[in-house]
Structures are given as C-alpha cells and as structure tokens.
Image (cartoon, helix red, strand yellow):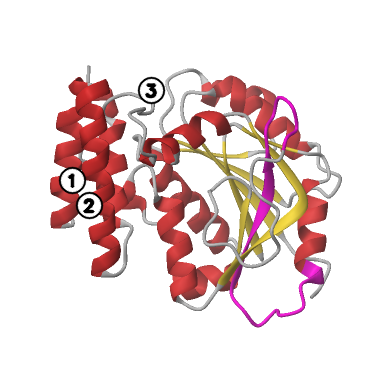
Amino acid sequence: MKNDLRIAAVVVTYNRKELLKECLQALLNQTRPLDEIIVIDNASTDGTDQMIYSEFPAVTYVRLPENIGGSGGFHEGMKLAYEKGYDWIWIMDDDAIAKEDSVEKLLSFIAGYKDQGKIIGFWSQIVDSENGCKLSNEKTEPLDSATFVGFAVSARLIKMVGLPRRDFFIYYDDVEYCLRIRHAGGIILRAPDSIVFHKDWAHQSQIKRKFMCWTIKTPKIPRWKFYYLSRNDILRGFAIKDKLKGVIRSFKLLGKVLFTQPQAAGFVALGIFHGILGISGKRIDPSKVK
C-alpha cells in the first residue's frame, strides 16, 4: 500500500466547545498531519461556531441547521469526506483526545496489513484519559464491532457498505454499521499503537454495557435517551432472531427503569413499540423534553 494515503478526521460535536477545543488541538498536533479536519456541529448554542472561527481557522466547519444527532452528524461528515476523495476517514466524538503519533501509527498499521483485498475498518486503541489504562482489549483477531471513536474507514469500504444510518439519531449506529461491514464479508481490526483517550468513556461504557447486566442499575442519562436506546437496539438487528434479542433486552431495560427511573418508562415503552414496527428517525426532540 502506498504511504501517501490521504486521511481526514471527522469530529461530531454538540454544545461541548471546551471538550472540542482539546480534541481539535490534539488533532492539529499530530506528528503525521491530517490532510483535513472536518467538524460537524449539530447546531450548538454554546458559542462553538465563534470558537472554531477564532481559534481554529484551518478546520473545515459545517454547522447543521438543526440537531440531527450523532448518527446524522457522522453520516454527513463521512459523506463530505468521501465526496472529497479521501482514502481514509477517521471519525470520533468531540471528547476524543488523540495521542500525538496516533495518525502516524494508524497509517503505519494500515500500510503493513497484508490482505488489502478485504474491506476493513481499523479501530484505534481506546484508553482512559485520566490514567492511561487501556479499556478496550488488544486482541489482534477481527473484532465484532467498534465504537465511532477513533474508527477509520476506507473509501472502498464506504463504496461497498454505504454510510452510517442517520435515522438512528443516537446510539447503536456504530454497532449497526459494524454488523453491516461483517455482513458484507468485511472485517474490523484494532490498530493497537494508535492511541485515543476517550474522556467520556466511563459514561458511555455505563450506557452501552452496564444497563444490560442483570443488576437493577440503569444509566444516569436524560430520560429521552432511553427511547433511542430501546428502539435502536431492536432496529440494529439484521435477522429476525437478532431483532427478537433486541426486544428482549429492551424489555429487561423497561423492567429496570420501572424500579429506578419510572419517569423514563414511557420513553422505553415507546422505543420498544417503534422498534418492533421499524419506525426510525428523530422521533423525540431533546429540546422539547422537559
């Protein structure tokens, strides 16, 4: 593989300008400079636009007319980078802090991979920002899935499997995309020396994993998010059996919520109902939920 690969970073943000500032500074400090940094702003109201224009003029800034969620943001950002002809697109949330040689190590790992005939996604090694502890395991065999933090996809992969589903709004868009990659015969590998600190990892881990355990605990998140958690866990499945598993998990979530956060139970129930019917899109507007 050529060493002159063109790579763009896509960062999706919403009302977290201080975290975004750290993220962008880390991307600009890479030992192997990115060819472009694209920020997709979900109509932030905290002055993100002024901060970008004044402090990061080299960054490509796209402010969306409305909040279309993380899923919509990644869809739009990857689409733009793909249309610009980049070989690789490295995507992340606004709370991701890349180590200074992360891009260099990522491209080196990509170039050294021998089976270039496969459609592949490469996932940087995610670590805890506070103590540097590696939180995602380092197995070298193909992974089942990856999160949209430090995930690199090629133009060829996008051509084969398309873009993330923008109609998920938030949650499970990364899982569904990875399932699509595997369904198409592709694989997902970890680039272990490409380090990305995920400042919000503990919170995300709680949301995406702990709430499915047999404990009564549920994630401490705004109640509207439970709608997308339950709905998209069903929608992400390809086969009927996978969708049924999603229904079962969502009903377990409903049981927990009834005990711990009863005010969110209606959102879970509606999510289950819409998931079974296959209804997607932005059905709950966060700005309209008190």
> Would you say 210 lies left or right of 152 here?
left
SS for callout 1: helix
Q: For mark 3, does the 10 Å Cα neighbourhood hold few (<14), some (14 to 19), or many (20 or more) residues?
A: few
Identified by mark 1, the residue type is: Ile
Q: Is residue 282 above or below residue 111?
A: above
Please identify the quadrant where the C terminus is shown. Answer: top left
Q: Position of residue 78 (x, y in %)?
A: 52, 55
First-in-chain label (3 vs 2): 3
Q: Residue at x 54, y 74 (%)?
A: 186
Q: Is residue 135 above or below residue 285?
A: below
- CB atoms at circles 1 and 2 under 8 Å apart? yes
Query: Is residue 124 rendered magenta in the image?
Result: yes
Identified by mark 2, the residue type is: Val
Instruction: Kindly identify which numbered label has been placed on residue 272.
Output: 1
Chain part drawn in magenta = 111-133
Could you tell me how far apart the alpha carbons at marks 3 and 2 are, in whole angstroms? 21 Å
- CB atoms at circles 1 and 3 under 8 Å apart? no
Identify the residue position indicated by label 3 in the image.
220
Q: Position of residue 151 (x, y in %)?
A: 60, 53
Identify the residue position indicated by label 2 in the image.
247
Could you tell me how far apart the alpha carbons at marks 1 and 2 are, in whole angstroms? 7 Å
Query: Is residue 80 rendered magenta in the image?
Result: no
